[in-house]
Image (cartoon, helix red, strand yellow):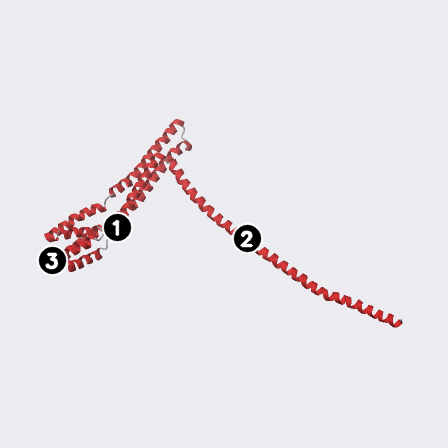
């Protein structure tokens, strides 16, 4: 009996010792699982924080772009509105005439520039082609070259070649006469541009005189010389004067460019005409 009790006691001690050990072995596994879950939660929170930061950066970038574009648009609108206000303050009647001078003058200048650029010819290449055509195919071949080339120099050459059978003197007279015709075509419209250059400041000065008259009328009506009474008329006078001068300056720049372009083409025409006569003389003596 005592032996049985001793055995049961030993079993009880063994069971009691094994239970804490099992719990001690189970606790690290649970701790590892808990740590893993905590790390996953931390990574998820970091990912969410990074995404939120990226979204905030994108929103800030878009806001900065909008903020940068807004002042530019505001400046454009402000500049346009300022021009409109200045036009109205200067008096729509005289300012309208000044604006018409600017529009018509610029239209004529652009038309002349396009025409002169199209009339420009490489005279060296044209002379070489004409000389080669005379050597290979005679006068008719040279006339075909001139007929297929654009510009006043080719037109003058064609007229000279048309009179080749009548002698070199007739060729020279034809070249000189038709050169004057081509020069008139090149200078076409320049007188109108000169008119608008002179007319725009005159209209501005007329607006100045009328503005001063209005200022003195206001002084007479108020019977008092004060800045508020005089400022309106003087402002109109200054705006119309400045507008007329600006239009004249713009058109004058284009006019001088066009005149220089015409002079260059005319010089090329004269030089090429002299060379053409020499080429025809050599061709005639060789045949």
Q: SS class of the residue under badge 3? A: helix
Say left or right for 22 vs 47: right
Say left or right for 275 vs 106: left
Q: SS class of the residue under badge 2? A: helix
Asked if marks 2 and 1 touch (Cβ < 8 Å), the reply is no
Q: Determine which residue is flagged by label 1.
A: 118
Residue 92 in view here: yes
Instruction: Please state the total of marks drawn on the protein image.
Output: 3
Q: Determine which residue is flagged by label 2.
A: 55
**Nearest the camera: 97 or 34?**
34
Residue 84's spot in the image, x, y percent?
Answer: 39, 39
How far is disc 1 from disc 3 in space, using C-alphas? 33 Å
How far is disc 2 from disc 3 in space, using C-alphas? 87 Å
Which of marks 1 and 2 precedes in the sequence? 2
Residue 257 in view here: no
Residue 41's spot in the image, x, y percent?
Answer: 63, 58
Which residue: 77% across, 68% down?
Answer: 18
Q: Determine which residue is flagged by label 3.
A: 284
């Amino acid at each position: 009996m005592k032996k049985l009790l001793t055995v049961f006691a030993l079993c009880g001690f063994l069971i009691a010792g094994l239970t804490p050990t099992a719990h001690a072995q189970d606790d690290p596994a649970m701790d590892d699982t808990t740590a893993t879950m905590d790390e996953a939660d931390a990574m998820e929170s970091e990912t969410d924080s990074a995404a939120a930061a990226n979204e905030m950066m994108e929103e800030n970038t878009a806001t900065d772009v909008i903020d940068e574009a807004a002042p530019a648009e505001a400046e454009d609108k402000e500049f346009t509105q300022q021009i409109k206000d200045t036009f109205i303050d200067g008096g729509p009647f005289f300012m309208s005439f000044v604006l018409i001078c600017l529009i018509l003058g610029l239209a004529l200048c652009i038309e002349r520039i396009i025409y002169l650029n199209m009339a420009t010819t490489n005279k060296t290449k044209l002379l070489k082609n004409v000389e080669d055509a005379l050597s290979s195919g005679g006068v008719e071949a040279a006339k075909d070259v001139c007929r297929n080339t654009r510009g006043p120099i080719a037109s003058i050459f064609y007229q000279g070649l048309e009179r080749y059978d009548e002698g070199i003197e007739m060729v020279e007279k034809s070249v000189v006469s038709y050169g004057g015709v081509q020069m008139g075509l090149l200078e076409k419209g320049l007188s109108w541009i000169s008119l608008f250059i002179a007319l725009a400041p005159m209209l501005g000065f007329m607006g100045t005189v009328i503005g001063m008259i209005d200022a003195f009328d206001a002084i007479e009506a108020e019977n008092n010389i004060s800045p508020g009474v005089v400022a309106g008329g003087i402002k109109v006078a200054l705006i119309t004067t400045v507008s007329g001068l600006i239009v004249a300056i713009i058109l004058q720049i284009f006019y001088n460019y066009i005149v220089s372009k015409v002079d260059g083409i005319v010089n090329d025409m004269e030089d090429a005409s002299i060379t053409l006569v020499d080429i025809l003389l050599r061709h005639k003596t060789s045949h």
